[in-house]
């Protein structure tokens, strides 16, 4: 599994990318992010739209409040997901 945040020109213009190279589904996978609040899943390669099994985060997740905001993600098998913070 690999994950990173792609920075943009604006401080909130970020994209979290998570890649899962295993056939396992990971539920409640914790990832630290720079902002609390809603994060929208803008791409999921396991979507039924692409012939996948539709495992994912139902379009959005909420990062916990606190000093180190975290997302609790469902990571689909053999797939990539992209999430962006709500503007």
Image: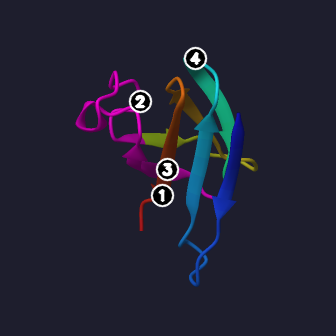
Whole-number angstrom distance, CA of label 2 to CA of label 1 = 15 Å
Residue numbers of the magenta segment: 35-60
Q: Could you give the CA–CA distance between mark 4 and mark 3, rounded to whole angstroms? A: 18 Å
Sequence-wise, the earlier of marks 2 and 1 is 2
> In the rendered structure, which disc, 4 or 3, sits on the residue that comes first in sequence?
4
Q: Is residue 86 above or below residue 48?
A: below
Quarter of the picture holding the N terminus: top right
The image's colour scheme reads: rainbow
The residue wearing badge 1 is 84
Other-residue count near label 4 (Cα within 10 Å), few / some / many at <14 / 14–19 / ≥20: few
Observer-side mark, 4 or 1, equals: 4
Q: Give whichever of 9, 72 is nearer the camera.
A: 9
- Locate residue 27: give its quadrant: top right
In this rendered view, identify the residue nearer to me: 66 or 28: 28
Tell me the quarter of the image containing the C terminus.
bottom left
Mark 4 to mark 2: distance in Å?
14 Å
**Element marked by disc 2:** loop
Residue on which the image places disc 2: 56
Q: Position of residue 6 (x, y in %)?
A: 63, 65
């Amino acid at each position: 599994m690999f994950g990173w945040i792609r920075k943009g020109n604006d401080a909130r213009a970020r994209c979290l990318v998570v890649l899962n190279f295993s056939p396992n589904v990971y539920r409640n996978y914790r990832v630290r992010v720079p902002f609390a609040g809603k994060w929208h899943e803008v791409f999921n390669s396991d979507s039924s739209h692409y012939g996948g099994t539709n495992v994912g985060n139902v379009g959005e997740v909420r990062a916990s409040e606190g000093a180190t905001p975290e997302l609790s993600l469902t990571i689909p098998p053999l797939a990539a997901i992209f999430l962006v913070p709500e503007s």
